[in-house]
Image (tube, coloured by chain):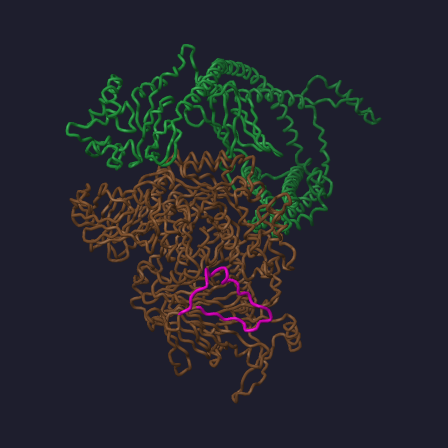
Amino acid sequence: MDSISSRPSKSKKIILRSVIALGLALGCVSAVKREDFKTCAQSGFCTRNRAYADLAKETPNWTSPYQLTTSSLKLQNGVLTGDLINTQEDKHPSPRPGLSFELHLLDNDAVRVRINERDPVSPRYDGVQDTVLIKPYGLAKDSAYTRLDKDAAGALTIQYGAQDQNKIKVSSAPFKIEFFVNDVPTVVLNDEGLLRFERLRKKEEESKKEEGKEEEGKEESKLVDQDAAGDEVDIKVEKSPLELKLEENLWEERFKDHTDSKPRGPESIGLDITFSGINHVYGVPEHATSLSLKATKGAGAPYSEPYRLYNLDVFEYEIDNPMALYGSIPFMLGHSKNSTAAVFWMNAAETWVDVEKNAEDKDSGLLSWIKSKKAVSTPATKTHWISEAGVLDLFVFLGPTHRDIFRQYSSLVGTTALPQSFSIAYHQCRWNYNSQQDVAEVDAGFDEHDIPYDVLWLDIEHTDGKRYFTWDNAKFPNPTDMQQSLSAKGRKMVTIIDPHIKKDDNYHVSKEGAELDVYIKNKDGNTAFDGWCWPGSSQWIDFYNPKARDWWASQFSYDRYIGSTKSLFTWNDMNEPSVFNGPEITIPKDVIHYGNVEHRNVHNLYGTMFHSATAQGLTQRNETNQRPFVLSRAFFAGTQRFGAIWTGDNMASWEHLEIASPMLLTIGLSGLPFSGADVGGFFGNPDAELLTRWYQAGIYYPFFRAHAHIDSKRREPWLFGEPYTSQIREAVRTRYTFLPFWYTLFHEASVDGTPIIRPMFTEFPEDEAVFATDDQYMVGNALLVKPVSKAGVTRSTVYFAGDEKWFDIKDYSVEQGPGAKEIASPADKIPVYQRAGTIVPKRERPRRSSKAMENDPFTLVIALDSQGEATGRIYLDDGETFNYEQGDYILREFRASNGVLSSHNLKTGSVGKTSEFVQRIGALRIERLVILGSKTKLTKVTVGNGNVAEVECSKAPIGGSYVCTVKEPKVAIGEDFELSWV
Amino acid sequence: MKANVLCIPLLVSIALNLVQANVPDNERPRGVAPSRAKLYTPDSTGNWKCLDGSKTISSKSINDDFCDCPDGSDEPGTSACGNTYFYCENIGHLPAYIRTSRLNDGVCDPECCDGTDEFDGLTHCPNVCQEVGTEARKERERVRKIEKEGSKIKSKYIAYGKGAKKRLREQLQNLKTKTAQIEEKTAKAQAVLDELNAKRQEYLESSKAEREAARKIQLEPFIQQQKQMLAKAIEIKSKFRSTLDDLKENYNKNYHDLAVKATITGFDEYLEELKQEEADAAAQESKEADQDLTAIKLLTLAQTQTYDVKKEIGRMFQLIKSMKEGYNTEYNDEAVLKAIKVLDDFAPSWKDDQNEFVDEDDIEVPEEVIETPQLADSGKGVFDSIYGSIRKAAKSVGIGFLFKEPKSELEQAQETHRKTSDEQKKLKDEIAGVERKLETDYGKDEAFAQLVDQCFEYKEAEYTYSLCLFGEAHQKSNSDISLGKFSSWVGDNHDTQMYTGGLRCWNGPERSVKVTMSCGAVNEIVAVSEPSKCEYLLKFRTPAACRIISDSEVPEDPNVIPEAIMPGTVPEGAEKKKHDEL
């Protein structure tokens, strides 16, 4: 705006008009109320830090004023410590020393960097680690690292890592940390010199300073500089607009009708992180954007706003926009052909992240691959992280592979909890199923139309006036019977429980909450905060209060939650938290949590704390040792330990179907694999084609639920008639046939943090053609999925990565990689392929629920690669209890090689005596083997003990190989066997 | 192959018992009904062909818990294929088929009361066919009674219905005869009127210029005054309009404030109506566009316009007012507050009881006095002139009310014409009504004719639903909302009606009701639900939906167990039965 105001008024008018026209045009295409949510320019700390970055860019030879005091550096027991000073602030003898610096070498090869104030006027909030990190981590042993000699510039270098592959170079003046893997630079901290740490100060001092300034004139201030002789001289400088921005909104901030009182004043932190040699970065969900993050700064950047991390309830959110959404995970992964690295910025306050690319490459796919072949400039992605409060606490993961990074990251924040098996089957939801009768009819509809489903959901209207834990008795006179009639068919129910509690003395939860004093407090720290949500005037439980968490958890016991049964589970919505009359539809930042913690510090974690207390409640409500199931809308790093999330209130449009894939892939690679998007789209009415295509895509979401807004028309899967009902039935059944494979993937994720649905680049890390691909993806390492997300499309271009074959999962037709090919995607199927070299366990018998499949036999689909080899796994447990923690499970690897299929136990350690479960389920048979990729017609299949099984092959080869089916090889899923074919 | 298929039903219908005798129970594959057992007989080599003919397999593969046939026919007794049906004998009740995907799935399916669907030993399903059968027989007996009663009533309905159409046709004939008579009368009256009008017109034409000049001078000030009022009203209207446009565009959807939502809905409905009116007006305008308007027309036009604009203001005022009364003050939604501010600013000039704002009183337009000369020589000239002078004298002393102004000849002719044409119109409407009734489909044998315009109510929570058959459906609580008018039957079975075109929903469709009819001894609404927003489902029981049971019909013998029909197959004799029904 500054540049505009300096122009002649005529041009100004023209510009203003065009701005208005642009605004109107945008208003037409989207329903989101952008003006309800802040831009960086409307956020004081974002403005200040962004202005600092602009200042650095504008200033020739910009040098970071931060320096490590070399003499203070100590490296001991895996921890490097030292003093960090800001040469502009700490020049004069100061009553306060500077900042403390720590670098931790972790025993999992990750590195933690912490910067905090040495002696702040009041403690900075440092509690995020207490809830986000799962346990104290181990530090690298002294023997695991080597301190190398200082170089000429005085930089300290540490070599460490399992293979001594990593080097960390710490430069003192200016302060900078470079990470190398095998001597290739990967991550650099403060490379651009954007480190900025606002120290806490007293307002009185500030106002005195302000007064002093007044006398000298608003736009002037004293700066300290050095003359040639090194003597300090005072010079008067007129402040530039950027410098003025550095002081914006320090003590109070307004947005629309709301004032943020900011009693502690400015306390933001900012740092730039450069990914060297890396063109693609991923992560920092949740945004409705592409998988490979687009630039927000620099020439030709597609976005002008940074990615914002601030959990918000956004009505009809806009696609292709870095605006904040319901959840936040400050995790970013960078990847190039040569290196892979990631960072975790452990901060739960409002955070903004700018992304700038050195070699901006807007093209994806093949074009970028061709281009990169002749690329000349060194690519790098520069990111700038800005948080409103807290301490600077950062983890760097150097891999060297993706799997290593996922394992390193998840060993700190936790892996996904192993879900109950029903929860990875199909969920049927709607706002609202209106009555017990309605529930019975929908349930019967599924049976009548022979479409399997596992869970029926009730939204807010099921309650007595939005009082959670209650029922509308007129519409649901007997909830227990209702749940039992579902559970008789192996089905479950989920009810919604939100964190806002209706203010009502006659409502037991509200009353108890007040008596126990467990509500979030106003900024005065005494009175309970009161806001508006579904029930009207409400209060919010303070889940930072341990007493509140326990009390909340206890609400789920059967004798408190009247009408709940063992087959009832929970949905936590509106937990950003959504406050209808709050700033940006959420709770004010200056409200107070337990321990006098300002909400500002913990906003992005609130939903997770709620989620965790609910999961605790479901876990402890019974003695049957059942795992909980809780779906949440808000999330943060660590949410995976408590349950699933979904992408919130999407819309019934092709664009929203399309964006679901990159959103879910991003959330998954950020450590939270159990996620889904509402099938069909929440707002609006999908036509039959869109709904069908969404089911065909949705069966490959880890969390698979259909949902609809109260104003939308009914859309239970049979309501559009034929051919749609059959197409949807086929899709849902396909999900059910793959449940053993999905469950095995969940187990893998629960052990080492691997995503379940995976971006192409994680499975094909050296194929640059797929680095930006997000319209197709992998389920585990075996299935390639390409959703159809355009109306009327019956042909799709699929990119077949790698040098091996791919087999269509329905007709076993063959495609050969690498390369893109146009594939038929008629109305009844989307392209899904099994990768050669994999073995996928399935259960192919159609059933009405996953529970009904638990005694069914298995099918193994063995896709041989060009060497005639394939491997795969299966994990099985009771799907309900925590008994697997005591070793009550089956984990096996199947390996096909040289015409022999073998099954090996992968369970490690002593597992005690074989349980009843392992015996019973382990004895289930493999009824069928489907062998793909055999160059000859198989004629004889022999099992180790001499049994001969029937085998039947396709009459002619398909794509150069035969499809052969082995009938009843008479082997059990839980036993070692060898089976050979010729 | 073809011949084979064709001969099967023949064979079955001739010798059902024989076939059963030929395939002993212990050889019949599990899950196969006795009548289909022969389909599972292996050929001489011990092989067997899938029922869809797609494959030949060893007969040992039947029910071996592995799916060989694409149609699942080799596994009628296991879940291996899951896409065919299992026969439960249900001795003591009725035999039934269930999907093989439901075998050994841990669920005791009610269709198999004998528990034979769960045979893997993991789930025990007790045989409850005796109890279920007894209950079912009782229930069948109860239903049969109702059906019988309904059938009796329906017979009466049919008798009435057939008579009704006859009566209607007679009525139509009468009305048509009457119409002919009245048409003649009207024509005569019209002729008289036309003549008088022509004469009057002649006079008016000749005096037009001078009269209009005088009238113009007389009315000019009034016209100006009225135009000012109109301009002012338009200004206020556009202020309200832009306020509401602004509110609609900018209100905060996140707040879910019902009062605000209701106002937006009302505004949308208003805009919808406006669109329609504007279209009508456009058509009207083009007709009048080029006419040189007389002073009085100008004035009345301005008056009508003012009235219309005020009406619109009133409507928008009420929309914002109701929002003001109900909105959530906590939200501080700027758009809402802005609208309320406009309302408050305007409120002092608002008169609630008249639902309009206060400005100058309406203008009373002075009448033009036209001394019309006698149009026809009626022979009453002398009397009239005497009467006229007496009346004049009486008027001058204040007792003019005693003397009626004599009706002019023209007025008399007008009245006569009005009477006859009113009568004619009334008849026309009646005829249309009768014709519509004659055209309406009252179901087979006119069974529903008796119910025409009969209304029924049903209470659920705070709502009372009413349905007038072949008329309109309503939902009443504080307000009375139309859910739609009868539009048609759905399908050919005369068991489902649609009522459409009800009040439009906010953000949704026009309300509509689907009415499903089932047999009952009395007419009643038994359930109302709203499966989708604004799409209602009303379940109605009526004798009109019953089957006619003739006295000669033998009640079903509880000891005769009807054959269960395998889904997807055509039972023998079914074709014939269908033809009988037709």
User: Could you tell me residue B271's position as x and y percent?
Assistant: 56, 42
Outermost front residue: A913
Write down the region rendered in magenta. A112-140
Seen from the viewer's position, the closer of residues B308 and A347 is A347
Q: Is residue A26 above or below residue A61?
A: above
Quarter of the image where the C terminus of chain B is located: top left
User: Could you tell me residue B563's position as x and y percent?
Assistant: 33, 21
Q: Is residue A604 above or below residue B71?
A: below
Magenta span includes B52: no
Identify the residue shown where x is 26% and y is 53%.
A871
Residue B575 visible at all: yes
User: Could you tell me residue B189's position as x and y percent?
Assistant: 61, 20
Seen from the viewer's position, the closer of residues B44 and B228 is B44
Task: Tell me, by letter, which chain the rendering colours brown.
Answer: A
Outermost bottom residue: A229
In the drawing, does residue A53 fall left or right of residue B270?
A: left
Residue A11 visible at all: no
Seen from the viewer's position, the closer of residues A879 and B542 is A879
Magenta span includes A130: yes
User: Could you tell me residue B353's position as x and y percent?
Assistant: 71, 38
Task: Tell me, by letter, which chain the rendering colours green.
Answer: B
Q: Tally the marks.
A: 0
Q: Main secondary structure of the magenta part?
A: loop
Q: Is residue A756 above or below residue B141?
A: below
Outermost right residue: B397
Quarter of the image where the N terminus of chain B is located: top left
